[in-house]
């Protein structure tokens, strides 16, 4: 049997950095491991996740880490991944089954910097969400993020506001919370 590139990478490369994001490692090593993992995950994409679910499992573990700096890596992964591979990802059942839930969870994160990243990602793909998710989690978190104290968060939300209203108008929800 001929070994595919993915099988080779999973067998030889993946184990080298699989342990790096572990809690037992110091933060700089964890961050480096996250970057390696996220690059690898972006390269293998949905087909790779189908064949090697351990990679996606590790990405999702990063999204649920107790350190906000690590969770931010997860949020940035989804931002980049959906931007680079949106056609393939949005058409895959995993988008609605897994990624939407992760993004909605990021919208409710205690850290405003993670929320604003998730808000940008969700806003860019709002038309692919179900109306109850938009009316519930999304709008609540837009309103919550509008009251963030950090000036750079306020600047980012101000930049997004026009796009948010435009996208909400497609669902007839733009005037609901005046």
Image: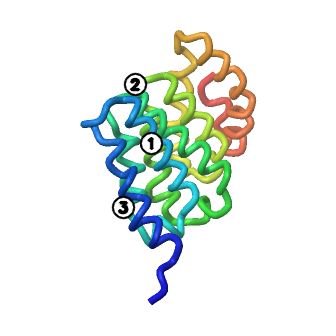
Earlier-in-chain disc, 1 versus 3 = 1
For disc 3, the neighbor class at 10 Å (few under 14, some 14 to 19, many from 20) is some
For disc 1, the neighbor class at 10 Å (few under 14, some 14 to 19, many from 20) is many
For disc 2, the neighbor class at 10 Å (few under 14, some 14 to 19, many from 20) is few
Residue 163 image point, x, y percent:
73, 34
Please tell me whether mark 1 or mark 3 is closer to you in this view.
1
Q: Report the residue marked by disc 2.
A: 110
Label for residue 103?
Answer: none
Q: Secondary structure under badge 1?
A: helix
3, 160: nearer the viewer:
3
Label for residue 34?
Answer: 1
Earlier-in-chain disc, 1 versus 2 = 1
Looking at the image, which residue is at 62% across and 35% down?
120
Residue 39 image point, x, y percent:
54, 50
* Quadrant in the picture for the N terminus: bottom left
What coloring was used for the rendering?
rainbow
Q: Report the residue marked by disc 3.
A: 54
Instruction: Give the spatial CA distance, label 1 vs label 2.
Output: 21 Å
Looking at the image, which residue is at 69% across and 20% down?
158
Q: Secondary structure under badge 2?
A: loop
Please tell me whether mark 1 or mark 2 is closer to you in this view.
1
Residue 32 image point, x, y percent:
45, 38
Asked if the residue at tag 2 contacts the one at tag 1, i.e. Cβ–Cβ closer than 8 Å, the answer is: no
Q: Secondary structure under badge 3?
A: helix
Residue 34 image point, x, y percent:
44, 42
Please tell me whether mark 3 or mark 2 is closer to you in this view.
3
Single out the residue that lies furthest toward the left: 24
43, 91: nearer the viewer:
43
């Amino acid at each position: 049997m001929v070994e595919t590139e993915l099988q080779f990478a999973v067998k030889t490369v993946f184990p080298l950095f699989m342990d790096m994001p572990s809690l037992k490692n110091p933060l700089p090593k964890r961050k480096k491991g996250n970057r390696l993992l996220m690059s690898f995950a972006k390269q293998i994409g949905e087909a790779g996740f189908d064949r090697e679910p351990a990679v996606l499992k590790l990405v999702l573990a990063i999204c649920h880490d107790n350190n906000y700096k690590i969770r931010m890596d997860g949020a940035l992964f989804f931002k980049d991944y959906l931007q680079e591979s949106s056609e393939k990802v949005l058409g895959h059942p995993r988008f609605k089954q897994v990624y939407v839930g992760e993004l909605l969870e990021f919208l409710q994160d205690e850290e405003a910097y993670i929320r604003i990243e998730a808000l940008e990602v969700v806003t860019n793909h709002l038309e692919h969400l179900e109306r109850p998710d938009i009316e519930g989690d999304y709008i609540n978190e837009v309103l919550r993020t509008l009251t963030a104290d950090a000036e750079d968060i306020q600047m980012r939300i101000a930049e997004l506001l026009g796009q948010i209203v435009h996208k909400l108008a497609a669902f007839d929800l733009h005037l609901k919370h005046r």
